[in-house]
Image: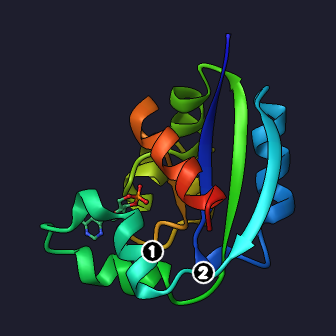
Amino acid sequence: TSEDTLLLMKPNIVGRAEMDVQRIVTESGLRVILTRTLQMDKMQASQFYTEHQERSFFAELVDYVSSGPVVAMLISGPDAIRHLRKIVGPTDPAIARLEHPNSLRALFGVDKTMNSFHASDSHESASREIHFINSY
Ligand code: CMP
């Protein structure tokens, strides 16, 4: 059975990796249902990342994600949440380059903060994040 998840391309790669990302996601057997470009302000980015609001890197994360347009992709397929997180790779691109060299963060990530992608991490966050982007 198919499920939906959200892939977010963060501002530093918007405008240069869309074609590669579409191809990598599609070739892995997942489907890109729709793509939407949007600009979050700091308040919206804080809401999107509300689960991290107590973390030391929260302000940095909000500044980064609101620094320019992001591309949100609705992704669908069997086990899509877990599958997409594997394609995206570990949070830290340096680790991704060592352990998962073909992952999106290995290929396009800069560092732990500027890791270029977000992927929903559970059914609950997928549903919340898809709704967030949809009602934008
Ligand atoms: P993402 O998967 O979008 O969701 C949480 C984000 O927090 C993560 O990507 C990183 O961008 C950021 N993050 C996680 N850990 C750290 C950290 N130690 N330092 C800075 N940013 C982090």
Colouring scheme applied when the structure was drawn? rainbow
- Residue 91 vs residue 135: left or right? left
The amino acid sitting under disc 1 is Met
According to the image, label 2 marks what residue? Answer: 12
Give residue 14's mark. none
Disc 1: residue Cβ within 8 A of ligand 1's nearest atom: yes
Which x, y percent locates residue 94? 40, 60
Q: Is residue 13 visible?
A: yes
Q: Quadrant of ligand 1?
A: bottom left
Instruction: Give the class, few, some or many, for how many residues have Cα within 10 Å of label 2's Cα (few <14, many ≥20).
Output: many
The amino acid sitting under disc 2 is Asn
- Going 62% across and 27% down the picture, which residue do you hit? 80
Distance of mark 1 from mark 2, alpha carbons? 8 Å
Image quarter of the C terminus: bottom right
- Considering the numbered disc 2 on the image, is that residue within a helix, a strand or a loop? helix
- Going 48% across and 78% down the picture, which residue do you hit? 65
Q: Nearer the viewer, residue 9 or 33?
A: 33
Seen from this angle, which residue lies furthest front?
Answer: 135
